[in-house]
Image (cartoon, rainbow, N blue to C red):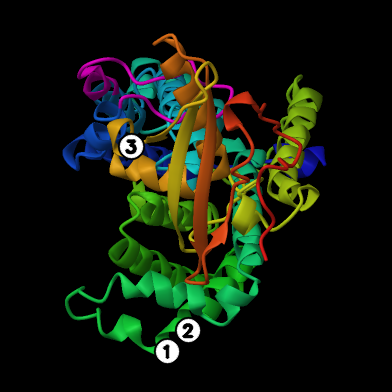
Amino acid sequence: MNKFLFKHIDNSGLIVFRIIFGLLCFLESFGAILTGWVRRVMIEPQFTFSFIGFEWLQPLPGNWMYVCYVVMSIFGLLIMVGYKYRFSMLMFALMWTATYLMQKSSYNNHYYLLGILSFIMVLMPANRYASIDAKLNPNLKKISMPSWCKWFFVIQLFILYTYASIAKLYPDWLDTTVIALLMKGKASYPIIGDLLQQNTVHYFLAYGGILFDGLIIPLLLFKPTRKYAFFASIFFHLFNSIVFQIGIFPYLSLAFSLFFFEPKTIKNIFLKKKPFYDSKEVIVPNYSKVLIALSSVYFLIQIGLPLRHHFFSDNVLWTEEGHRLSWRMMLRSKGGIATYTITDKATNKSTPVRMKDFLTKKQQRSATTKPDVIWQFAQYLKKHFAEKGMDVEVHVRTRVSINGKSYENLIDSKVDLANEEWHHFKHHDWILPSK
């Protein structure tokens, strides 16, 4: 085990990955400002739906969230050039995680991936070459790294893609219902819009997605298939970038290929002046047992989190219990209609709530179809009217459709959601079963 994990290999892949990763951190952060994402998601809402337990994390007042994202983009550039690397990487990781946890109406698995990768990168010796740190401190410069640095990324990717593939193995994906619905909104795209509506294309995308996610890591690891898998990866991720416009994720995924090709190949392409390390020394540090133990715990958590929905009642596509942090990406289309009603306990008078008085359009969609957001909005309404001297009950009627199917009642309207507690590891009986 020590020989496998602590044998030193050339670090060209990690060095180039750091440069690309820093650039992508900059583009994601600054791009969030330029595209208006920060304004729509962080500034315009009266409040945000944070991850439950992190309600204290709310956006900074006024325009300060712009400053927050500018600072993150600066840290991205510092990561890229390798200046004060560990500090810059840690600060970016903390700030990105904070902004990730403070809102989920714009939830995206890719934001989660960037968060955990940022903390992983804090631990990586990624500033040992082609960095300002190494130039200022020549003693820091190294051309090798322990093998575990590479395998940490490989295992993380294997978990991500495997679960993404398994999650697609359900009827509405297999009969292309989901793909057809996703492509319907792309009909106006120039050149490819009409093509994306073709049934043959839907089957290719549905089953190609399953096969790609399930096989890409093994095929990249196997030298005879590596080149073909890389070209398939380019097509897959560029397609996703063009059609779904999902930010930096396709390019981050392509950057991971650096850990699969031979280090000498990476060095010859990107770092031609860098000496190549080929000594294969095994250097076991004093903290080896701690590192192995902590890494094992981390990966057990990564393996366990996507399985937790099996311990809840009903289908995760319906209840959303166990959906987040589980690599369940673009798996369904969901829509609904909701009515919130408050009842003054003192007068027994009921009044419907105008959602648009409290929520943005994007937030309204989440507060219509996602049980945890529905519960949070009920809690917010209770607090809001309590500040006006009213003790209220909050009842919700919401009808939801998944993948174009008939609408069904999602929430038990007889239950006062304002008086319900949230359970992270227990099914909520006020979520009605799907038919």
Foreground: disc 3 or disc 1: 3
Judging depth in this view, the residue of 115 and 412 nearest the camera is: 412
Splitting the image into 4 quarters, where does residue 189 fall?
bottom left
Q: Is residue 376 left or right of residue 26?
A: right
Cα distance between the residues tagged 1 and 2: 9 Å
Cα distance between the residues tagged 3 and 1: 41 Å
Judging depth in this view, the residue of 243 and 396 nearest the camera is: 396
Locate the C terminus by quadrant: bottom right
Is residue 279 visible in the rendered structure shown here? no
Q: Is residue 165 left or right of residue 385?
A: right
Q: Earlier in the sequence, mark 3 or mark 2?
A: 2
Secondary structure at badge 1 equals helix
What residue did someone put label 2 on?
Answer: 204
Residue lying at 24% horizontally and 80% vertically, measured from the top left? 192
User: Please, what is the three-letter code of the amino acid marked with disc 2?
Assistant: Phe
Foreground: disc 1 or disc 2: 1
What residue did someone put label 3 on?
Answer: 354
Residue lying at 61% horizontally and 39% vertically, measured from the top left? 149
x and y percentages locating residue 11 in the rendered image: 51, 41
Badge 3: few (under 14), some or many (20 or more) residues near its Cα, within 10 Å? few
